[in-house]
Image: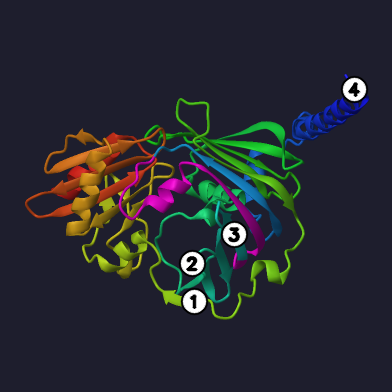
Amino acid sequence: MSVVRGEARRRWLLVAALVAALCSVPFAVAAFPVADARVDPPRLREMILGSSGRTYQGLVETQGSLGLPDLPGLDDATALLSGTSRMRAWYESPERWRVSHLTATGERDYIRSAQGTAIWDFEEAQLTRIMGAPAVRLPNAADLMPPDLARRLLRLGNGSELLSDLPARRVAGRTAAGLRVSPADTTTTIGSVDIWADPHTGVPLEVRIVPRGGSRAVLASRFLDISDARPSASAVAPQLARGVRGTEVDTFDLLSRLASRTMERMPDRLAGMPALETTPSIASLRAYSGGFSSFVVAPLPGRYGRRVFEAARTAGASALTVARGEALAMQTSVLTAVLVRDGMIGRTFLLVGAVRPDLLRTAADELMS
């Protein structure tokens, strides 16, 4: 072997050693001893709920494995809950923040300000301002930020949940205190909501939703890096170039359009659960409150309702026996969706919740009666 070839091999060995060392850094950091960060569970819950005024900025990764089928008009939301996504967030206050959903070809930004919410689509060079605050809508990337997701889930509880502590863990380089929320109601398909939060500020750093009887999370959201520093004004509300196409809408997605344009009023009570208070303009789409067993009902107008029903049948939805009409059920480890229709009258309803199918069947029977 020549001296030149020997030197070249040694250089490549050095490069390989450096690469191996760099790749081992995350594992080494994760293996650092975790300091005792236990916080009394009720106290940690209150800290999390009271953390909305804390500023932060950072990179978030979400992983969903809900396995939802693609249905007409709902594919963006189902894709978000059934894959891996990364988002960059800049948060100043509940009324001033920006979340950038990063994609392979660009990004979609959700920008909140005193003027309302705007959505910037990088690929389309399109800015959409949403007039007012839609009472109902499909989930988007901003809803999956660990702080917002954790607070939303904690508020869903009705006080009967069991609170317990989880071992502290390192998240985004920080030691985080753990909280497990276990619903007492066996009607829900959620086994636990696991949250790790900063023990000093209460800001949630990681959230996991685990199905009943399971051990692996079907939806997880965690910070990869985070800073408590107040984000700059240009990061929260970037100035877009001149010439950007802009539009204003009052209903941005399919769910909000259905809620505003369908006139049929849902009952005040279904399956023994009261409807949440709502305005007359969205009485056609209602949520029924049962803690973690809550569910939503939406009437689907004629032609669209038939399209969704047939799409669900094609996707492999199973037949569900109801007292009147025809019903299909789609179930994942956490979410259950039931479509029920009355062929004679032409009504179709979509019922969705983290609940057992029997509860939605009872609600469907009452709708069809």
Q: Amino acid at mark 3?
A: Val
Sequence-first tag of 2 and 3: 3
Q: Nearer the viewer, mark 4 or mark 2?
A: 4
Q: Position of residue 93 (x, y in %)?
A: 65, 65
- Residue 254 x %, y %: 34, 60
Q: Mark 2 packing: few (<14 Cα in 10 Å), some, or many (20+)?
A: few
Query: Where is mark 3, residue-wise?
Result: 99
Mark 4 surroundings: few (<14), some (14-19) or many (≥20) residues within 10 A = few
Q: Mark 1 or 3, which is nearer the eye?
A: 1
Dot 1 amino acid type: Arg
Farthest-out residue, right? 3
| Residue in view at x 35 percent, y 59 percent | 255
Task: Please tell me whether residue 141 is drawn above or below residue 177 in the rendered image.
Answer: below
In front: mark 3 or mark 4?
A: 4
Tell me the distance, in whole angstroms, between the alpha carbons under discs 4 and 1. Answer: 64 Å
Q: Dot 1, crowdedness within 10 Å: few (<14), some or many (≥20)? A: few
Cα gap from disc 4 to disc 2, whole angstroms: 57 Å
In the image, residue 6 above or below residue 288:
above
Q: Is residue 348 left or right of residue 44?
A: left
Q: Of discs 2 and 3, which sits in the foreground?
A: 2
Whether label 1 touches label 3, CB < 8 Å:
no
Measured in 3D between alpha carbons, the distance from the residue under mark 3 to the one under mark 4, in whole angstroms, is 56 Å
| Residue found at x 70% / y 71% | 233
- Compute the Cα span from label 1 to label 2: 9 Å
The answer to whether mark 1 and mark 2 are in CB contact below 8 A is: yes
In magenta stretch: residue 91: yes
Query: Where does label 4 land, which residue?
Result: 2
Q: Earlier in the sequence, mark 3 or mark 4?
A: 4
